[in-house]
Amino acid sequence: MAGLLSSVRKRLSSDALRTGRNGGQTDPVVAELRAALAPDRVRYDGAERTVLSHDASIYAGGVAGPVCFPLTTTEVQAIMVIAERHTRNVVPRGAGTGLAGGAIPLGAPIVVSVTRMNEIEQVDTANRFAWVGPGVVNLDLTRHLTPLGFHFAPDPSSQQVCTIGGNVANNSGGPHCLAYGVTNAHVLAVEVVLPNGDIVMLGGLEDEPAGYDLRGTFVGSEGTLGIATRVAVRLTPNPPAVTTLLLSFETIRDAANTVSDIIAAGMVPAALEVMDQRITVAVENYVHAGYPTDAGAVLLAEVDGLAESIEIDAHHIAALGHKNNALHIRVAADEAERAALWKGRKTAFGAIAQIAPDYYLHDTVVPRGALADVLDKIYEIADRHDLLVMNVFHAGDGNLHPLLVFDAREPGVVDRVHQAGAEIVRASLDAGGVLSGEHGIGVEKQAYMDEFFTAEDLAHQNRLRQAFDPGCRTNPGKVIPSGHSCADIQALRSVPRDVWA
Amino acid sequence: MDLNIDTDDLNICVQCGLCLPHCPTYRVTGDETMSPRGRINLMREVQDNDAPLTDEVVDAFATCVQCRGCEPACPSNVPYGQMIEQTRETLVEVGKVTPAWQQLALKPLAHPKLLRAGSVAVAVASKVGMVPTRFGLPEGLPIRQKPLVASGDDVWMFTGCVMDAWQRDVHHATQRVLEAAGFGVKPTGRLAPCCGALQTHAGVGDQARRLAETVIDQLEGQPVLVNSAGCGAAMKDYGRTLGTERAKAFSHRVFDISEFLAGHADRLPDATPLDLRVAVQDPCHLRHVQRVHHATRDVLRPFVRELVELDDDGLCCGAGGAYSVLQPELAGQIRDRKIAAIDRATPDVVASANPGCSMHLAAAGVPTVHPLTLIDQAITTSGPGN
Amino acid sequence: MTARLAVTDPVLLAFADEVGADGPVAVEGARTRWEVGGPGHPDTRLVRAPAGIVDYVPDEMTVTVRCGTTVAELHQALSAEGQRTALPERAGTVGGALAVGENGLHVLGRGRVREAALQVRYVSDDGKVVTGGGPTVKNVTGFDLPRLLVGSLGTVGLLAEVILRTNPIPAVTRWVASDDADPFTVLDTILRPGSVLWDGNRTWIELEGHVPAVDAEQARLASMGTWIEVDGPPELESHRWVLPPGEIQTNVDGFGSRFVASVGVGTVWADVAQPSRAVAAGVTALNQRVKEQFDPRHRLNPGRDPGAR
């Protein structure tokens, strides 16, 4: 989902676009790319390059170079070969909904948009897999599978727009990944064009392909190891029954303790989502889903599976809620009520847009037992920086999404947001957590990588990178921080050619 | 260059991208310059950073269907429709879009006789194969039409321009249904010849506002019922486009025909349902702008055997007022997508409450009728007293 | 400033010293699957990974364990809290199970070995302790090095300590068998079986969950054959095949006189060996480049090839 500082973005991007206005000669690779693809599928005009210089993050780096819209693996290969011949960098792109800056160009790389590689090629329900293009939209795939009795399990909040290729790059999660696992558990094979132009099939339809688990390392590599051109995804049968409970509590600590107790009791619900009072009020005013606005926190718990089994789990969850002083427990009576509750949860960020024009959405994971303490800390940090924070998060796996809500027109607020954000990230690390649960590192969290990993750890991540991309030309300057990476970040940030010339 | 877009509006968008799948041009091109997020990005570049109006920038703005499917999808409530209308209007002023011949072509809309004469000419020409198929015009435009006659003064029935010229049978059906529900109907006819929606889309704001003033002046008192979704949306928006209290008051009196009938469902007679499986195709300006598309289903359901939903989230069909004529290639691709969704739903007939949509789909061979035509048929064939 | 993942545990540092920075070296576990990947080089010095459960927090569903610990010992400790892992019961040590990376017969119910390791600590080719992944159940911080290490046969790093994901042990586990049921139809009928095994004639199903749910599933099975309750899975044959699940039936004639196939997964235990699986040239080259990066001097478990299976 969204979370950004529009005004910051504008300032940064216009700087990038205003510099060096008198460039003007055509990029020499454009003609070659057009010959290899088609003239209308390689764009080099200012409009295209400007628009594809951004993703959903606040970050601005360089400016898109030639923008390619390949249709086939062979065309992606041709792009990679041309890029290598000219020692040019390449940035793959899906729907551009990432929040960590993973899809923004640094320097003036060739941008490869896979949106037109959007065919669902084969669906095999007997063997529970489908071959899809990287540009297939996550929700389109699930809708295609629904009448067949299956779905694609990862369901990030951006699922109506994000692509399978983007899910592979970011190892995307979502509320229902608690029980079903994140993208890595749902990708069997990935056809990849490597930076040297080789086409390789990583993984396979068999459970344990021979050799290193390169499919497993490719998923979540944020587009730095090559470009996925076809993906074999696992199909998950739709559960025959679903029960959704809404529990309200006086304090967010009670809600967090209930989550811990549910996990400790040996249950793995399909989803466990918590919203604090501030965001619950905002959501209720926005969508009128029937959320209680007087509670300190609400817990949305969903169990799915066999009817005989979810009844037991639902009772157990209710009992644990009562044990933790639940004010009220409600079971969604029908699909309509269930849909309304989920709509509220999934449009939480929209509700915030009604309160203030800007917000910064963070993403860290902490041990589940530390949730309540870290949340206290987050409120304290926000108070100290005179900022409004709201918490809505995947409680079941400890994945926090603190939202700092503000108006960027207020002088100095952006700096305070960044300071508070840094403290929140460090508070999560102090509690034994990690930098990101879903959004990835991109350019957003590179600066924290040194605080988490040792230099040796990062050097080993770079070894993997070198094996795939020795020239560091595919999405360079992402994930691994400057100083540990093969790429010369300074060169990447050099002033790009003017796009409007 | 100042596009005259409100600076605050321009700042609302946080570029999250949730609009992309709801944009028909992005859906068929995969190109973000043809998405709301991309277009807003370009508006900012032009207005705030003085980026030049290159052909590609103008094209990005000109290819927007203005379906406004992005608006309900936007978590930040960006008023995209207003922003693109304002952009178009500014581009018209500087001569970048809607050249003079197109502006001229919009004039007859306000002059029923002229329009009807032109339509007859087109109808005759298309019968003898003189109109290129790329114009996407429907076959069988009426050459002669029966006049509409007032039956009372409970409600205004807005007859409009194109609709009256090309689909007057729908007006007749609407009037019969209203009368069956006990309402005396006043067709607006020449009193208020055109709502100005097409002019607004084309960025010819002055023409549009003049037409709006006429409509408001002439249609006093009773509820104004509209059976064209595009007209209804424009008339409900007069309060904003004209900015006067009188216009706001008028807009509150405007109802889509289904919206109105849904509020008086108890007055509709019982009838034997037509033996048809009907797919409801929501006109964008009914679903995304007026947001009263559920009323169509509520009103239609008792009169047909089966209603079936399309599975495309109400994505635009590509008609977009004059869009199908101005951007035939994109409009065709967008329509192909819609037709695929219709094929999946396997209906006998498609119900669409907007003349642009129904003509655009009919031109591709999709049997499309107005929902009121179906209701009228059901009531009429059931006979009085049923 | 010290990185959060910096290693201070003297046991791990001592293991790194023992591995050292020179000469061919490999970790010896219980030798349960010692032959996988071909014979190791005879001059290889064998070391043992440290053992012991370091930290087990049942509420977090994670356990930190040194790799020399046996799977049996680990699972005994976990079962006291009603938990288990995806590591196969038949494996020897935790490190061995991960280095070999073979799934057991409970994949459908307990998950895959490749998805079990949240964080790995291994000794690198130059004798340093390196950490990949992270301690939480959900994490996308940096590249997924745990995936690379699992199944790598100790050729890119020697596993020292891991954080594993644990799963709850269901209220009831019940094995049923039938001689007249079609296992492929069964797989489509039972929502989440723990295991579906087939030997060409007999089908075994592991039903898991709450008692009423297992009873209900068992009742559903009745329409698909005659079932009897059995103590557990059949004996597995010694040669392990890995196939796409859709290719079990087409390969039945190749499994020899006896086999047990994991339906829906594609693992087959047969009494003849699987013909070596072809790996495409491009993938082989990429595997070699990975090996060169992580072990340029070829000192980590020389002679073994994760691609030769």
Image (cartoon, rainbow, N blue to C red):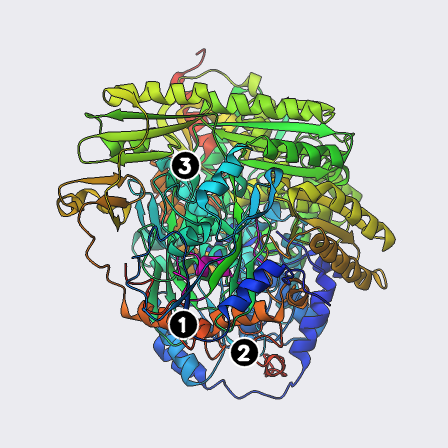
* Residue holding disc 1: C24
Q: Which residues are magenta?
A: C138-156
Q: Are marks 3 and 1 on the same chain?
A: yes
Residue C296 on image: x %, y %: 43, 77
Which is the main secondary structure of the residues drawn in magenta?
loop
Give me the C-alpha separation between circle 2 and circle 1: 28 Å
Question: What amino acid type should be assigned to the residue bearing mark 3?
Answer: Gly
Separation of marks 3 and 1 at Cα, in angstroms: 39 Å
Q: Which mark is residue A486?
A: 2
At which x and y percent is residue A153? 46, 43
Residue drawn at x 51%, y 65% as measured from the top left:
C123
In what quadrant of the picture does the N terminus of chain B appear?
bottom right
Quadrant showing the C terminus of chain B: top left
Provide the residue designation for mark 3: C109
Judged from the image, the secondary structure of the residue bearing numbered disc 2 is: loop
Q: Is residue B198 above or below residue A64?
A: above
